[in-house]
Amino acid sequence: MDARENERVRLRGDGPPLLLIHGLGSPHEWDRTIDDLSARFRVIVPVLPGFFPGDDLIDYTDELWVDYLESLRQELGVDEWAVAGISAGGRTALEYALAHEDRVTRLVAIAPAGMCNIHWAYALPGAASWLPPLLSKMTAKPERLRSVLDTGDWVEADGSFSDWAWSGFADRMAEPTFRTNFFHVGVRVGTGRRGKQWAGLLPRLVTETLIIWGEKDNMFPAALAKDLGDMISGCRVVVVDGCHHMVTMERPDVTVREIVGFHG
C-alpha cells in the first residue's frame, strides 16, 4: 500500500497518474476496471465529499468537488494527471478540466450527467430545493429503491440493476445522510448548467478529450455524445453498442480498451 493511501483514496499501479472520478453511487463503479488500468497507470480513486461513510451533509456545488480533487492532486504531489469520470463524475471531470486545464493531460467523460434534464420535474421552479427530500422519502425503503433503479436500465442487457452493482448500495442508501446527499447532488447536477452554457464553455477546452456513451442509456440519450463531441475541438466519441448508463460496470473491457488506446 502506498504510504499516502487511506480508506478514502485508493492508489494502484506505478505508471502515469490517472484519476478516476465516481458518480452518485460510489468508487465501486470503477472496480471492474481498476486491475487492468493499474497495469498501465498509477490509478487514483478517491471518494468524493458526501459519499464516504460518516460524511456530514454537504451543500453541493460544482466547485466543491473540483476543489477537493485539486487539493488531492497537491497532497499526492502529482504535477499533472489524466482525468476520467462517469455520470456525475464525468461532469466533474469536465468541470475540473475547465478550471485546471494545465493539470490535465487527457480527459475522459463517460456519459456525463447534467447535460440535459432526466425528468420533467427537474425543470420546475425551485426543484433543487424541494425535489431531493421528496425523492429521499420515496426511496427510504430498499424494495422501493430497487424498483426505481431497475426501471432506469442502468446495467446489463436485460435492463436490470445487477446484483453486483446493487451489493452494498442499498445498505448505504438506508443511511439518511448518504441518501440525502445522493439526491441533493443528483438534483443539483440535474438542474445546473444547461445546454447553452456548456456550448459556451466546452469550446474553450484544448485538452485531448474522449467521450464514451452507452447506446441504450435511458437516463441521458446517446445523442448527447455527438452534441458534446461537436463542442470540443478534436474530441473522439465512442458509443458502445447495447450498453446502458453505467458503462464501466456493464462493459469494463470496452472502458479499459478505449482509455488505454486513447493514451497511446
Image (cartoon, grey):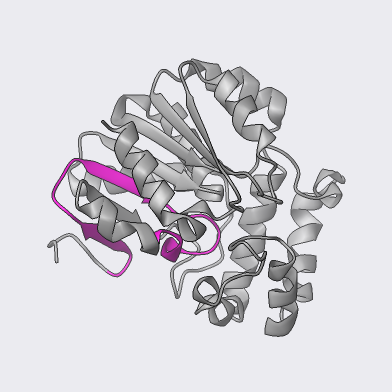
Q: Position of residue 184 (x, y in %)?
A: 65, 58
Q: Quadrant of residue 181?
A: bottom right
| Residue 85 drawn above or below residue 136 | above
Q: Position of residue 107 (x, y in %)?
A: 40, 33
Q: Residue at x 17, y 59 (%)?
A: 4
| Residue 248 drawn above or below residue 147 | above
In this picture, which residue range is highlighted in magenta?
7-30
Left or right for 192, reference 7: right
Camera sees residue 202: yes
Left or right for 134, reference 114: right
Q: Residue at x 70, y 69 (%)?
A: 150
Instruction: Using the image as rendered, state which of residue 245 and residue 195 is in the foreground.
Output: 245
Camera sees residue 141: no
Magenta residue check for 27:
yes
Q: Residue at x 45, y 17 (%)?
A: 234
Instruction: Using the image as rendered, state which of residue 11 and residue 225 is in the foreground.
Output: 225
Instruction: Using the image as rendered, state which of residue 44 and residue 158 is in the foreground.
Output: 158
Q: Position of residue 229 (x, y in %)?
A: 56, 25
Left or right for 16, reference 200: left
Q: Residue at x 42, y 48 (%)?
A: 254
